[in-house]
Amino acid sequence: MEINKKVKRRKFISAIGLLGLAGVTPLSGFATAKVLKPDEEPILKAGPYLQAAYPNKITVRWLTNLPCYSYVEFGETSDKLDRKAHTVQSGLIEAFNNNNAITLKNLQPAKEYFYRIVSRVILDFIPNKIVYGDTYTSPVYAFKTPAPKAETLAFSIFNDIHNRPESFGHLMKYQGDTKKDFIFLNGDMINFATDENQVVNLILQPLSTLFATNTPFILSRGNHETRGKFSRHLNNYFDGGENRYYYSFQHGPAYIIVLDSGEDKADGVMVYGESLILMLTV
Ligand SMILES: [Fe+2]
């Protein structure tokens, strides 16, 4: 659904380009140029996708194309989403932001919950006047909190996808029918990090479409996630061990240790800057 919206938007932007030229040199037969209003932008950019699932809490993440006030409505049945969660930072409810990480707290273990995300566009945000635009409301999704004393655990591992997001869907055909507790991304999902759109197109959107609205995933950083100009921002999109890429946790019968794969080369090699700096100063 989101892909279609993007295609439409791309076509529209190219049409705007044509009409813009027409405005400089009026041509007969061209329609009046349509001005793109903020409310006509697709609000949802990626997600939702589940992170950091614990018996009593889980984090819902998503990105918007426009600054919004965003929250999660959730509950124990699909037709009664009677609880609401948003993020509070330093006494302020998070608003006018695009990157959402909202943790649903005080959950019960081994229980199914239903949720939907809501993003209300903020067109203008001055102290005495906040102007709201359109609101995006997602379909209702479901997830189940982990059971601390579960006797079994089921998960799939993806390794070395390397910029081939279509492989997620192909490989999932071979993982069997057992419902997975989580999906483990075992490093090198990308070749190197470039920007947010790359993270969206290669990881977030494919996984949300396949499973991440109802099954959490864990990103274990590989050496390729440490490379590229956006590598220092990747932790803004994933939740694991409190801003660390290495941590451990108990899940049912298993104790899981997530390692930061880091790099297989010395700090002074080209991809880590020192050699590059030397090259630039020679
Ligand atoms: Fe690799």
Image (spheres, rainbow, N blue to C red):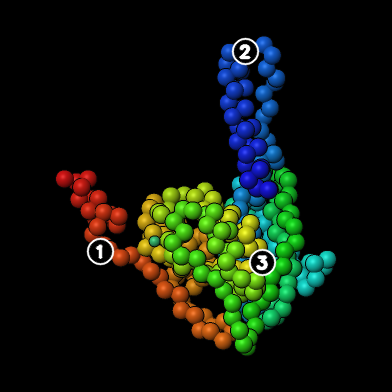
In this view, 243 is above or below 255: above
Location of residue 22 in the rendering, given as x and y in whole percent from the top left corner: 61, 17
| CB contact under 8 Å: marks 2 and 3 | no
Residue at 58 percent of width and 26 percent of height: 17
> Helix, strand, or loop for circle 3?
loop
The residue at which mark 1 appears reads as 266
Cα gap from disc 2 to disc 3, whole angstroms? 52 Å
Q: Amino acid at mark 2?
A: Pro
The residue at which mark 3 appears reads as 214
Location of residue 39 in the rendering, given as x and y in whole percent from the top left corner: 70, 41
Q: Would residue 189 appear left or right of 273 to someone viewing this image?
A: right
Residue at 83 percent of width and 66 percent of height: 79
Q: Amino acid at mark 3?
A: Asn
Q: Would residue 69 appear left or right of 264 to someone viewing this image?
A: right
Question: Quick one: 12 or 39, which is closer to the camera?
Answer: 12
Q: Which mark is residue 26?
A: 2
Cα gap from disc 3 to disc 1, whole angstroms? 39 Å
Q: Residue furthest left?
A: 282
| CB contact under 8 Å: marks 2 and 1 | no
Q: Which mark is residue 1?
A: none
Q: Residue furthest right?
A: 79
Residue mark closest to the camera, 2 vs 3 = 3
Residue mark closest to the camera, 2 vs 1 = 1
Where ligand 1 lies, by image quadrant? bottom left
Q: Quadrant of residue 246?
A: bottom left
Residue 59 in sight in this render: no
Cα gap from disc 2 to disc 1, whole angstroms? 60 Å
> Helix, strand, or loop for circle 1?
loop
Q: Earlier in the sequence, mark 2 or mark 1?
A: 2
> Helix, strand, or loop for circle 2?
loop
